[in-house]
Image (tube, rainbow, N blue to C red):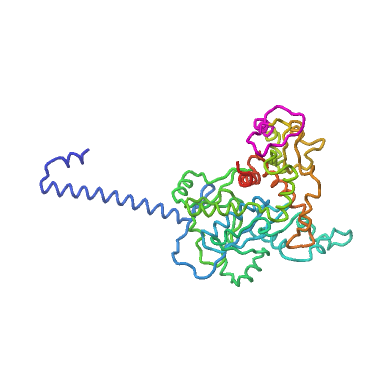
Amino acid sequence: MLLTRIVNKPQSAHGLIRFTKSKAFILFILASFFLLSHIIIHFRLKLHYSSATATVIGTTIKTNQFQQERYLAYLPHSGLSNQRIELANALLLAYMLKRTLLIPPAFLGNVFGWMPREQLMDHLQWLTTPKPFTKLCQRPTPGKIATYVQRSRCEEYRNFGVLSWSDLHDLSPLSPYIQYRFQDVMSLETIQKQLNLSRDDIYLYEDAQLYDWRLYENTTQAIEILNEHSNYVDSFGGRRYYKVLLPQHFYREEKLLFLGGVFGSTRLNIVDPELKTVYQKITRALHYRLDTPLGMTVQSIVDHLGGKGSFMSVHFRTGDKPFKKELPTNLQNFVKNMTEIVGSHETDSCVDIPLDSDQITVGKKVKVYIATDHKDPKGKSSDLLPWFREFPCTVTLGDLPGHLLSPLDDLRDMVSPSKSLKRFLIPLVDAMVAAHGRDILTTPRSTFSKYIEELHKAWVPQ
């Protein structure tokens, strides 16, 4: 208000000078405030600030390009679906950091969960380093102490299968964008030797927990998360807080950047359209192959059921504790949702969905394929019996002729070739068949179900 009056008055030379000085002073104050704010924000992002609820980490960006090849590695863990998410994140991070990704094998069966680096590395090294497993892991013999020494590790070995990711996915479309190589033996010593690295050439990132960090490309978003103390994730295991990282944190000179776990569908938060395009390419490349013995097995089962899109599907997870707890609710919702889709009337016999029609309200005797980790879905004490009463024409993997699974007979463990992978691949076959249904109902909060829904959209376009 005062400034307006001064501007509107006729100005003497002295008054004009006084006004000019006042205006300059105000501009100086505003500029200083803006500069100070910028410095504070920049400093906060370069600061390693840690508390129980908030962490933002950044480092100085080096503009020079490294001349020699540099590598990125990580430690996989948990079920195959989670490993696939880790692989997708690692591929994108390798692209962002211009590093060659060392891709570990894919692990099937009962896979250990997240652990601190030293423990996780110990498990991976033992299980991926070739050795006479059959001899080492003989059943314990009473009176022979040596046969008990490896008992816990051998139990893990017996319930664990190893194969290359290339047997599951065709990564070749990514070659023009991302450099990668397959790392069969997950041993730091082996990697160091193969890449001719010294200890100073390696940077090991130590995870403090499963959800240790998230990366944010948008600096403003990172600051907001810090200020709002919202850097946490509510998982089945409870609330977990994570560090907030900027991409610059991983701009390092060491030849090998060796991360811990990189699991999490929201681990990398990107905004750059180029990165989003690359991530879409990664997503497509990580669809299961159908030109392998695994894929051929799936195709033969789908044909046996009447062909792609001729049946409805459910992917019903019940085995793990969180899904077991939600089983009654999920079952009720599945029955309700399927009834809304196909109608509540009944026909005299089981009905296929017409392939040449959009009409799927064929009633409750529609043919349904249910993929589930339930040990005995049609058993007398099964929790799933209400489903089969509602939809009596439901087929499970156990109802199929055994010969349809024969293409899996020759698939062998890449570390221990005497071990068959067939039993470890059955859950994949089960889920992949379900992805060929006309519509599919999936289990809430399951990353595996979410992936199968993604495959369904790719394989059975509506």
Q: Quadrant of residue 334?
A: top right
Residue 246 versus residue 354: which sits nearer the camera? Answer: 354
Find residue 187 and report its horizontal and vertical position in percent.
67, 65
* Vertical placement of residue 65 versus 285, above or below: below
Find residue 237 and report its horizontal and vertical position in percent.
64, 44
Instruction: Please check the rendered image and state whether residue 351 is part of the magenta-colored stretch, yes or no.
Output: yes
Instruction: Please check the rendered image and state whether residue 41 is part of the magenta-colored stretch, yes or no.
Output: no
Q: Outermost residue toward the top?
A: 345
Find residue 9 and report its horizontal and vertical position in percent.
13, 40
Q: For the magenta stretch, what is the residue range?
A: 332-361
Residue at 85% from the left image edge and 58% from the top image edge? 140
Residue 98 versus residue 51: which sits nearer the camera? Answer: 98
435 sits to left or right of 406: left
Residue at 48% from the left image edge and 54% from the top image edge? 274
Residue at 61% from the left image edge and 64% from the top image edge? 181
Residue 122 versus residue 286: which sits nearer the camera? Answer: 286
Q: Is residue 237 visible?
A: no
